[in-house]
Amino acid sequence: MSKKYPFRYDPFSWLGISGLQRTLLLFVVLPLLVLTALGIRFGLEQASQFQQQRLKDDLELIGRAISIPIGNALREHDEQAIELALGSVFIIGEVYGASVFDVNGVRLASAGITESDLTRTAIPDLIVSTGQAQQGFSQVGGRHLFSHFMPLFDAGGQIQGLIQITRRASDFGRALDQLEIIAWLAWAVLAIGILCAVMLGHYGGVGRHVDRLLEHMQRVAQGDHAHRAALEGPTEVAALAEGLNQMLDSIEQARHELDQRRAAETDLLAQLKDQEKMAAIGGMARGVAHELGAPLSVIDGRARRLQRHAADDQGQQRELGAIRGQVARLTHTVRQLLDYSRPSAAEPRATSLRQVLDSAVAAITPELEVAGRQLEVEADSAQTLPTVKGDPGRLELALLNLLRNALQASEQRLQVQLSQQHGQLRIDIDDDGPGLPEASHEQLLEPFFTTKPPGEGTGLGLAIVNTIAEEHGGQLVLGSSPLGGCRASLLLPIHQGKRTA
């Protein structure tokens, strides 16, 4: 019984995303997108700082440009010139307001929107103490402004006042809004492009080959152990497929070796069973031969002596003949038991099967004449047929049993054919009897199994023949005969040595 191991459930399978794709997205694409987003964010901040600094520098340049005429006008107390200079800053179009304060923070002149009073702030003191420009954001008239304060110096280098130039704080952010939108749109397009490239690249380069490899593995899991994966795709995937094939080959080889071991164990068990059976039959046969041999010989001898003394009495002759017939049947049964349990030939030799057949036919001829049967033999001469390696006595015993069975089953004719087929010598013995009984081939070859009426057979004839055939590396085959009865075929391997007459 084989245990099935299904593939692990993937909760993202309904999205059409495989585990490897998800890994690429999490550990490659996502970090790449995060890094690019951080880069864009950093770039935008740098651009924003640069833009703000540029706008501040513009205000400083404007302040420096008007500081000289305003300083001169302030020394001369020419308010009209001051206002004219302040109004000139609006020509640039980037200034929201401009004003002039004294060192105490009191506004002297203004244009546009500016601070009305700086006396409560620390800006005048910082400018006077440091002599440097100051910057800052403030709310003026509900508007968020950015102010740039610059000191005004007199001819002796003393601070005589300060200039404030303002512009809307939104100008600093509005300059980068469009750039930020374009940057994030470009990042989105880049993200989509990276996703598509990774997904398509994964499928084209790895994914489809991994899917095919999984299909190969699924076929093997479903029982197709002879299937092997194709070595295709990237080197790593092909290496996995090769490893899978090697593993399957190893499993198949191990299974084959296991089957061979099981078959060998089965054969050994069968041989052990046969040996135990042979030992049991041999012990029984020896016991029967010992217990019945001497009494049967005495009975047969005395019956033969009585037949000689009562030669004129036909009734006694029939009775004594019947006694001797039963004694002969018991003697034949004991001989069959001994033949079945007898070990195989210790020193087989090259044997002419035609000569063995002739000897067996000569031995069975008296029984054929008594039964009134006709035997036909079709065989080439001993010189034209190859030899077999075996024990002539055991082979003759096998042929005698087959001929005797055919004689008992026949009605008029028996036929024997000796031929050479496919590297084997084949002896076919046919009869015109009723044919094979209703029993399997294995049952017919079992010892003591017989289909004959009680008292007419021991069931050892075919078992003896089958044992002798196996001893010589051959086979006994039973089938139907062209004569209408049974055909018993004895197949023996041809001896590869020199032919003998």
Image (spheres, helix red, strand yellow):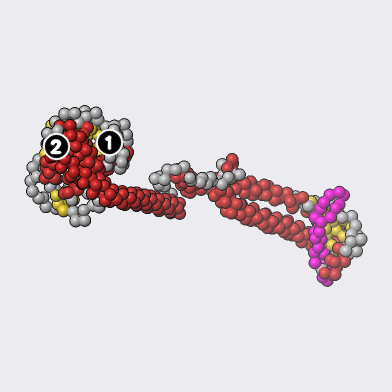
Mark with earlier residue (2, 1): 2
Residue under the point 29% across and 33% down: 453
Q: For this rendering, which residue is in front, 59 or 224?
A: 224
Gap in angstroms between the C-alphas marked 2 and 1: 28 Å
Q: Is residue 170 inside the magenta stretch? A: no
Q: For this rendering, which residue is in front, 477 or 373?
A: 373
Give the amino acid type for the residue marked by disc 1 in the picture: Gly
2 or 1: mark nearer the eye? 2
**Quick check: can you spot residue 106?**
yes
From which residue to which does the magenta span run?
132-159
Give the amino acid type for the residue marked by disc 2 in the picture: Ala
Asked if residue 96 lies left or right of residue 178, the reply is right
Crowding around mark 1 (Cα neighbors within 10 Å: few <14, some 14 to 19, many 20+) is few
Percent position (x, y) of residue 270?
A: 34, 49
Asked if residue 310 lies left or right of residue 90, the reply is left
Residue under the point 22% across and 32% down: 409
Q: Secondary structure at mark 2?
A: loop
Q: For this rendering, which residue is in front, 364 or 275?
A: 364
Q: Secondary structure at mark 1?
A: loop
Asked if residue 148 lies left or right of residue 403, the reply is right
Asked if residue 500 lies left or right of residue 168, the reply is left
Percent position (x, y) of residue 113?
A: 84, 51
Name the residue that disc number 2 marks: 310
On residue 455, the disc is: 1
Majority SS type along the magenta span: strand
Residue under the point 9% across and 45% down: 382
